């Protein structure tokens, strides 16, 4: 009647000491176990991370974190939605003696200070947000942009709260409407000393009416980093009365303690309150000492609807152990075997009964397309980058403007959310450029496409560029000399990769030097999810930022006419047709997002071709 599955990870600690030598030992067994569990149970719909994604809240650590998230996503397959909250390692601790930080020690006793912390744009709140600035940038660029890209397909809606990591999120998957409440429990942990019973979370961190939000969902989860036992007595009381009274959530998920644990509290009301603690994915204590200790584990959860008002919550804790011969193996955690593994839970809403003969099906409820189908191929099965101009539709005005800019030697940055079509536009520039550029008086000699996701570092980048152009690897002045008699249009995809520590600022400085000026040998066409001035906030004392020479050009969603053009083109030559109502519903449900449109059309195609 409906199933929702998620992973619970915590305490990744990207960037901590010992990561380079200890994490590789655990990485492959962990990813192999993920693949095995996914094959056995099915892919997760969600991946929840309850804090300590980084080790010291630094930008370089979040760049490394993105690579780890990609490895995990590839291991489980599909498009799981990542949902994260910050931990005490996701902020930059202030210098000892900082007056504002010392003042925050009186948070529990000072009502005026508490009001200042949770007042938007107050000096105190601005101070705290600066401590979380690199986490907040990662959240915006990686997590929030993915929510935006999947908004239509998963019926996502969200509101952000007063501090980084505070949010209310609703989504629909597997016939269930799930709410997730994220809270920042780390904003008072401003140093390395013991903060147990000194931290706080407040109802004021939430952006709207919490009971009303939860009642709109079939079930809801609460996520934070610290166990409730780390809250001050005052905050623990508010937590139990106003945030998590018995029965409001399926459970409260957290980490911080580096081991699996589940507890259920049962008080005078007789209604349970559940706490589910996750092991650290990469916990490393006392690195380099004789007492060095590692902890690696994660949890799998599944929520199934058993009846209109009842469900079953299942929990599978997985942990890594070293065998007597030194091999690392994952298995069910024997220490958690006696704890909550399966429990019956109430669901708030009955599933809607679909009409018997709907003129247009609910597109998001149709089953995904099986890649193993032996029937004629689904014309909507491909949703990635298009390289064939015959399959490319719409974007005519955008292409006209781009080619006009390129003829003038102007650089551009295509900006838009994930899977909006930026990569396909770059490919069309390369495919159509020989006819539209090389026939002009401009002596254009090459169009080069590079996907930076496939490039490891700055050396690999220059090697790939030179290889595409047909001359030996070089950079700097040697590269400029090689390009002196050429005119090259360089299309760079996934420019976010240039923020990695593996790509020093000198790479962008060289690109700017080669692309700046009327007689520059290089013309840049970049693709990015966010504007370049946010992506590369370069120091003012360095060479002028790259974004100054690459004005942004927004890639919008498809218009309704462009959606119809794409669908009509893909259906050509098949025995299936979509009605005008089908086309209107596809546009409404996808909101013009190309990848979402293609995914929904693929489901509708399977549904329609099964009908007489």
Image (cartoon, helix red, strand yellow):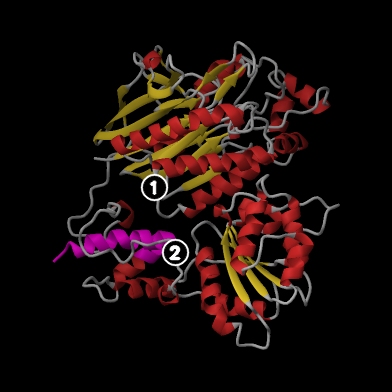
Image location of residue 496, percent across then percent down: 62, 53
Closest to the observer, 78 or 342: 78
Quadrant location of residue 530? bottom right
Residue ID for mark 2: 594
Q: Position of residue 587 (x, y in %)?
A: 39, 66
Please give the residue where the numbered disc 1 appears in the rendered image: 78
Density class for disc 2 (Cα within 10 Å; few <14, some 14-19, many ≥20) is many
Query: Label 1 crowding class (10 Å Cα cut-off): few <14, some 14-19, many 20+?
Result: few
Give the answer, above or below, for where 113 lies relative to 532: above
Residue 397 seen by the camera: no
Which element type, helix, strand or loop, lies under badge 1? Answer: loop
Q: Seen from this angle, which residue lies furthest left? A: 612
Q: Residue at x 67, y 34 (%)?
A: 57
Q: Is residue 343 visible?
A: yes
Residue plotted at (61% across, 31% down): 20
- The residue segment tinted magenta is 586-612
Front one among 515 and 252: 515
């Amino acid at each position: 009647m409906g199933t929702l599955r998620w992973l619970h990870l915590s305490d990744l600690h990207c960037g901590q000491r010992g990561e380079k030598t200890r994490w590789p030992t655990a990485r492959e067994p962990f990813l192999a176990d993920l693949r095995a569990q996914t094959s056995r149970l099915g892919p997760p719909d969600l991946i929840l991370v309850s804090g300590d994604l980084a080790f010291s809240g630094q930008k370089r650590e979040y760049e490394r974190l993105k690579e780890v998230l990609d490895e995990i996503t590839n291991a489980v397959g599909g498009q799981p939605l990542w949902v994260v909250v910050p931990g005490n390692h996701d902020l930059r601790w202030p210098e000892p003696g900082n007056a504002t930080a010392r003042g925050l020690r009186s948070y529990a006793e000072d009502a005026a200070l508490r009001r200042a912390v949770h007042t938007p744009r107050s000096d105190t709140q601005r101070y705290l947000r600066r401590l979380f600035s690199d986490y907040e940038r990662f959240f915006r660029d990686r997590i929030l942009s993915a929510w935006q890209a999947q908004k239509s397909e998963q019926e996502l809606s969200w509101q952000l709260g007063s501090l980084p990591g505070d949010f209310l999120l609703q989504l629909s998957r597997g016939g269930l409407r799930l709410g997730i409440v994220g809270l920042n429990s780390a904003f008072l942990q401003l140093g390395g000393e013991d903060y147990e019973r000194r931290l706080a979370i407040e109802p004021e961190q939430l952006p709207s009416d919490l009971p009303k939000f939860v009642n709109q969902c079939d079930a809801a989860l609460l996520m934070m980093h610290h166990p409730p036992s780390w809250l001050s007595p005052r905050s623990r009381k508010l937590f139990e009365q106003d945030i998590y009274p018995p029965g409001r959530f399926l459970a409260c998920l957290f980490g911080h303690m580096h081991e699996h644990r589940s507890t259920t509290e049962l008080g005078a009301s007789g209604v349970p309150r559940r706490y589910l603690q996750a092991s650290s994915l990469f916990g490393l204590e006392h690195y380099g000492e004789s007492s060095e200790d590692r902890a690696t584990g994660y949890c799998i959860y599944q929520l199934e609807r058993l009846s209109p008002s009842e469900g079953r919550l299942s929990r599978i804790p997985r942990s890594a152990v070293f065998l007597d011969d030194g091999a690392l193996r994952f298995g069910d955690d024997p220490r958690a075997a006696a704890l909550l593994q399966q429990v019956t839970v109430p669901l708030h809403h009955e599933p809607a009964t679909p009409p018997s003969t709907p003129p247009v099906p609910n597109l998001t409820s149709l089953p995904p397309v099986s890649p193993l189908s032996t029937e004629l191929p689904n014309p909507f099965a491909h949703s990635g980058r298009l390289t064939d101009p015959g399959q490319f539709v719409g974007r005519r005005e955008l292409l006209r403007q781009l080619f006009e800019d390129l003829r003038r030697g102007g650089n551009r940055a295509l900006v838009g959310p994930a899977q909006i079509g930026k990569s396909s536009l770059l490919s069309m520039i390369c495919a159509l450029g020989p006819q539209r550029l090389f026939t002009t008086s401009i002596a254009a000699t090459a169009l080069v496409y590079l996907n930076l996701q496939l490039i490891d570092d700055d050396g690999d980048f220059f090697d790939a560029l030179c290889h595409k152009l047909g001359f030996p690897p070089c950079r700097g002045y040697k590269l400029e000399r090689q390009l002196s008699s050429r005119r090259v249009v360089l299309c760079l995809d996934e420019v976010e990769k240039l923020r990695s520590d593996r790509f020093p600022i000198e790479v962008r400085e060289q690109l700017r030097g080669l692309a700046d000026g009327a007689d520059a040998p290089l013309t840049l066409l970049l693709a990015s999810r966010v504007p370049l001035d946010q992506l590369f906030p370069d120091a003012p004392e360095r060479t002028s930022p790259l974004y100054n020479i690459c004005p942004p050009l927004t890639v919008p969603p498809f218009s309704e006419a462009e959606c119809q053009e794409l669908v009509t083109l893909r259906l050509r030559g098949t025995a299936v047709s979509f009605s005008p109502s089908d086309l209107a519903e596809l546009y409404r449900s996808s909101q013009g997002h190309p990848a979402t449109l293609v995914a929904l059309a693929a489901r509708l195609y399977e549904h329609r071709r099964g009908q007489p």
